């Protein structure tokens, strides 16, 4: 590229040429060489195309806990983060991309979730004068495509350890624990977190934020036998004493009893996905016959089966002592110890669910990969 005829063209002309590409094609072009990456990352080019590019839905991986711990222990300067990146998978191209995060001036950072084109990370120890001290953690929101970022008001390390971070509309963030919740919105006049009591019956499992509703699974059973129930609240309701409502209908029957270790994900059109192992019986240590995906319509509160893992795929997870679930919308990803690849359920435009494998996973892990959906956008501003 350094000796390409493109270098002889005025920059405005190059920008006009590449402005006709899709966002997917622009991301691919940026991988060609440093010169083209710099050209297609310039503020003038991003401004030119920011209003004409639809978002690109990708599957993003969180760094493994092993890698995150290594970075924390070896990050006396910014060198440990020089190669840091967000690894994303394009299901249409069946290809892994890498978005560099080295522009973030922190000793270590850990991507956790995203919403509306913005990536949220826990960060520790900035290299510059604009952030928390070396021993504190804060939430950072950034757009990896435009390299813009912003620090949210500082938090204690306990929220990082025990809190689940939920994000909705841009700059709307909720951190939820069993006993308390904190909320921040960019529209608030005060630049600080609002704190509420949550008073859930147990530690929330895989909480999600859909529109203005917060949903979480809680174990209301005994120490000897789990009994999962679905609870719902809103940010507004968290301000009142009667905060959480248990969602249940007689027609649901034993839907929670047939699921082993259920998890929630936000589905399409404000629907809820519940994923878990389908028990072979009601016994305490029952084995699972497959992994089931159920879908809840929040308007009529009716469940339907969205998909179940094929037997030839499930046998790899049957031998795994643990598996993780991530995704959302029309995609659900599964990882398991010693499986070595990801299983993907994806709903096509006709509403039919399809299963396939994702290979070539980057990085080192114990096989239990975690992640989230990243909707890449050029016009998302932290």
Image: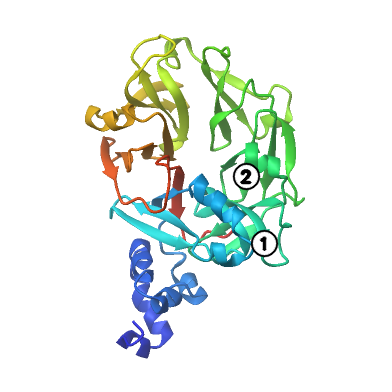
In this image, 368 relative to 177: left or right?
left
Q: Does dot 2 land on a helix, a strand or a loop?
A: strand
Residue 4 lies in quadrant: bottom left
Q: Which mark is residue 169?
A: none
Residue 318 picture location, percent across and down = 32, 27
Residue 376 picture location, percent across and down = 44, 56
Q: Nearer the viewer, residue 59 or 279?
A: 279
Of label 1 and label 2, which has the lower sequence position? Answer: 1
Residue at 35% x, 56% y: name it: 96
Residue at 38% x, 53% y: name it: 362
Residue 66 picture location, percent across and down = 51, 47
Residue at 46% x, 29% y: name it: 263
Which image quadrant: the C terminus? Answer: bottom right
> Is 352 located above or below residue 113 in the figure?
above
Q: Does dot 1 land on a helix, a strand or a loop?
A: strand
Q: Residues within 10 Å of mark 2 (few under 14, many from 20)?
A: many
Q: Which residue is mark 1?
A: 126
In this image, 281 relative to 64: left or right?
left
Select label 1 or label 2 by which is in front: 1
Q: Which residue is mark 2?
A: 173
Q: Nearer the viewer, residue 133 or 21?
A: 133
Which residue is at the far right?
A: 190
In this image, 8 relative to 104: left or right?
left
Please say whether residue 100 is visible from this viewpoint: yes
């Amino acid at each position: 590229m350094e000796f390409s005829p493109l270098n002889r063209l005025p920059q405005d002309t190059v920008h006009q040429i590449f402005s006709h590409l899709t966002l997917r094609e622009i991301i691919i072009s940026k991988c060609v060489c440093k010169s083209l990456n710099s050209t297609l990352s310039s503020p003038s080019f991003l401004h030119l195309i920011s209003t004409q590019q639809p978002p690109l839905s990708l599957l993003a991986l969180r760094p493994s806990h092993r890698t995150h711990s290594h970075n924390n222990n070896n990050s006396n300067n910014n060198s440990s983060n020089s190669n840091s990146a967000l690894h994303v998978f394009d299901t249409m191209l069946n290809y892994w991309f890498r978005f560099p995060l080295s522009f973030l001036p922190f000793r270590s950072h850990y991507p956790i979730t995203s919403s509306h084109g913005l990536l949220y990370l826990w960060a520790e120890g900035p290299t510059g004068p604009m952030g928390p001290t070396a021993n504190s953690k804060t939430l950072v929101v950034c757009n990896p495509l435009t390299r813009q970022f912003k620090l949210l008001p500082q938090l204690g390390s306990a929220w990082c350890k025990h809190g689940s971070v939920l994000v909705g509309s841009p700059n709307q963030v909720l951190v939820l624990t069993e006993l308390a919740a904190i909320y921040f919105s960019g529209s608030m006049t005060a630049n600080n977190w609002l704190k509420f009591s949550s008073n859930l019956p147990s530690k929330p499992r895989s909480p999600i934020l859909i529109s203005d509703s917060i949903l979480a699974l809680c174990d209301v059973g005994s120490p000897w036998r789990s009994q999962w129930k679905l609870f719902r609240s809103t940010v507004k309701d968290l301000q009142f004493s009667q905060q959480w409502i248990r969602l249940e209908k007689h027609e649901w029957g034993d839907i929670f009893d047939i699921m082993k270790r259920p998890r929630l994900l936000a589905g399409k059109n404000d629907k809820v996905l519940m994923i878990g192992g389908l028990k072979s019986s009601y016994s305490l240590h029952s084995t699972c016959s497959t992994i089931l995906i159920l879908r809840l319509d929040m308007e009529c509160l009716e469940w339907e089966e969205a998909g179940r893992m094929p037997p030839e795929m499930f046998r790899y997870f049957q031998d795994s002592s643990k598996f993780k679930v991530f995704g959302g919308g029309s995609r659900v990803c599964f990882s398991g110890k010693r499986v070595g690849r990801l299983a993907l359920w994806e709903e096509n435009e006709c509403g039919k669910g399809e299963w396939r494998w994702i290979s070539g996973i980057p990085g080192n892990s114990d096989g239990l990969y975690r992640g989230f959906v990243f909707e890449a956008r050029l016009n998302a501003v932290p």
